[in-house]
Amino acid sequence: MLFRSGILIVLLAALTFSAAEESEAEKTVEELVVETLAKPETCTVTSEMGDTLRIHYTGRLLDGKVIDSSLSREPLVVELGKRTVISGLEQALLGVCEGQKIKATIPAHLAYGKRGYPPTIPGDAALEFEVEVVSLVQQTPWQKLVNDVFPLVCLALVPTLLGLVGLYLYKKSTAQPQGKKKNKDKKSKKK
């Protein structure tokens, strides 16, 4: 009996320890964690919204299972702010240098959320990405104008155009209609 209770105590302790590890892992993945693995000696230009990055990446579940990798393909082109990658990875890529390597641990709400990406990524799965920034191209002033100012101009034009259409329709509906008799009268007066 003593032997059985000893095993029971060991099992309970192991379950408690693994539950504590799981809850600790869940706590650490509530927010984005970015760790720098390698950084070039000179880093004069860092990435900002609108910049274009070419990256190599390896994405994993927290259990280590690889879900995707670009290492056997061409680098992935990411334009920051255009939502070409999951939001957690996009946030992790802000402020990086060309040649920098990072490891980003991304919580589920900044990755694929409750639905996941079946069958590869289960729901509520936190992800880990190792990323190498191959190149960084800063946004030109023209691109900044197009990306920042042009949408605002378009946003202002929509109400203006709607107002002009409304004014045209109002004037058209309140204008005095000319009947056929009036047209005939005008023609007969001219003769």
Image (cartoon, rainbow, N blue to C red):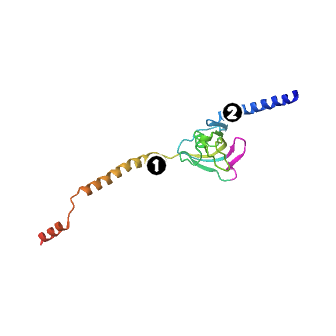
In terms of secondary structure, where does tag 2 sit? helix
Q: Is residue 111 magenta?
A: no
Instruction: From the top left corner, tell me how far across and down residue 27 is, in percent.
Output: 65, 33
Q: Does residue 96 appear anywhere in the picture?
A: no
Q: Which stretch appears magenta?
A: 58-72
The residue that label 2 is drawn on is: 23
- Residue 61: name its quadrant: top right
Q: Is residue 65 magenta?
A: yes
Residue found at x 41% / y 49%: 154
Residue type marked 2: Ser
Image quadrant for the C terminus? Answer: bottom left
In the image, is 95 to the left or to the right of 190? right
In terms of secondary structure, where does tag 1 sit? helix
Tag nearer the camera, 1 or 2? 2
Residue type marked 1: Val
The residue that label 1 is drawn on is: 146
Question: Disc 1 to disc 2, how far (Cα)?
Answer: 46 Å
**Relative to 45, does residue 73 appear above or below in the rendering?**
below
